[in-house]
Amino acid sequence: MDPSTIPSTHFVTQQFDAWRESIAVVFDVERLSHDADATFDARVEAFQLGDMVVTNADLGGQRYVRSPARLRQDGMDHFVLNLYRTGGWRAQTPRGEFKGAAGQVSVLDLSCELISDEPDCSLVALFLPRSLLEDRLPNLGALHGSAPSGPHAVLLAEYIDILARRLPSLPAGDEQALSRATCEMLTACLAPSLANVEAARPGLELVLQRRAKRYVEAHLDSADLNIDAICNAVGVSRRTLYRLFDREGGVLRYVQSRRLERVRAALADPCETRRISDVAAEFGFLRGDHFARAFKHLYGRSARDVRNLTHRAAEVPSETSPARLGGSDGFDDWIRALPG
């Protein structure tokens, strides 16, 4: 575990019994009948974020159970919010049956009964003590087993995805601030009000910026990529868009840097044989002198130098598959230690 980054741990296994032992801190699990003879894989990367635990996981199909006997046994009183990147779920609760699919966030109240059948999936899970949410969201338990819907739910899913992808590189010391920001985002999206949305503004703007960057990335070779097009695609005003990209040096500078990176990547490809000017023109650089200055300013060498450099072989990382990497504690230990 790198002490300069947020505490993390990894769990990897192809043994269902080993997975059953680890996830037993929260659920009783069993294989789905049609998957009983299939190969099972579990890969979990977990992060300790203040008083919550965030996991990135790729898991084989299984049934999760919190029975009345289990509830009496462990007395666990936390919530779990799952964002399904792939896969989905079919849950049975005392309130009925609920289904969900990729892209949705499910809410689980661990003080309540549950049976959830889930095929192979990739998901992000947030394990949170009830105490973090009960004052902000006193009715959250009413969503047990189901998924919130509407535009705010979409924002929440995008935020959770961004958070999980960035956690491996975020510096240690930010845990409590990120935990607070995440709680504010949950509040704003699950109980939207003017005050709650204002409190969650940094998280909401992070989502909007990501949408804008996705649009830019998909249209780098388009002559119609401009401020108005980005605003219309993201649904924000010019003023908001400028604020979202303030730390990037401005929208137009960001677009230019991404286009220059596309040109650089093309010129570094030995299979790319077009003239440099033709590659540059594909990404909107119609004036050779402007392109040459911008390219050298960003990369410190000319485009021709990049094309002529010998391509270095990419380093191939060695693969390891121990059950746990990163520290003596596993994600199950962290969940067990969450405050009641």
Image: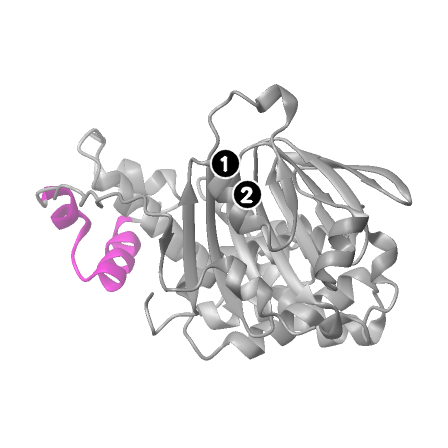
Count of number-bearing discs: 2
Q: Residue at x 10, y 46 (%)?
A: 309
Dot 1 amino acid type: Phe
Which of the pair 163/320 is nearer the observer?
Answer: 320
> Is the residue 130 above or below the residue 227 in the image?
below
Q: How is the image coloured?
A: one colour
Magenta stretch: residue 69 in it?
no
Q: Is residue 233 left or right of residue 39?
A: right
Name the main secondary structure of what is drawn in magenta.
helix
Q: Quadrant of residue 169?
A: bottom left
* Whether residue 279 can be seen here: yes
Q: Residue at x 64, y 22 (%)?
A: 33
Cβ atoms under marks 2 and 1 closer than 8 Å = yes
Dot 2 amino acid type: Arg
Residue 84 coordinates in the image, percent (x, y): 63, 43
Q: Residue 16 shows which numbered tag?
A: 1
Magenta segment: 288-308
Classify mark 1: helix, strand or loop: helix
Quadrant of the rendering where the C terminus is positioned:
bottom right
Residue 89 coordinates in the image, percent (x, y): 71, 36
**Category of crowding for the residue at label 1, using alpha-carbon neighbours closer than 10 angstroms: few (below 14), some (14–19), many (at least 20):** some
Q: Residue 315 shows which numbered tag?
A: none
Q: Is residue 263 left or right of residue 62?
A: left
Quadrant of the rendering where the N terminus is positioned:
bottom left
**Circle 2 residue:** 20
* Whether residue 235 can be seen here: no
Q: Residue at x 60, y 30 (%)?
A: 31
Which of the pair 223/36 is nearer the observer?
Answer: 36
Which of the pair 98/264 is nearer the observer?
Answer: 98
Q: Residue at x 34, y 73 (%)?
A: 3
Q: CA distance from mark 2 to mark 1?
A: 6 Å
Residue 48 coordinates in the image, percent (x, y): 51, 67
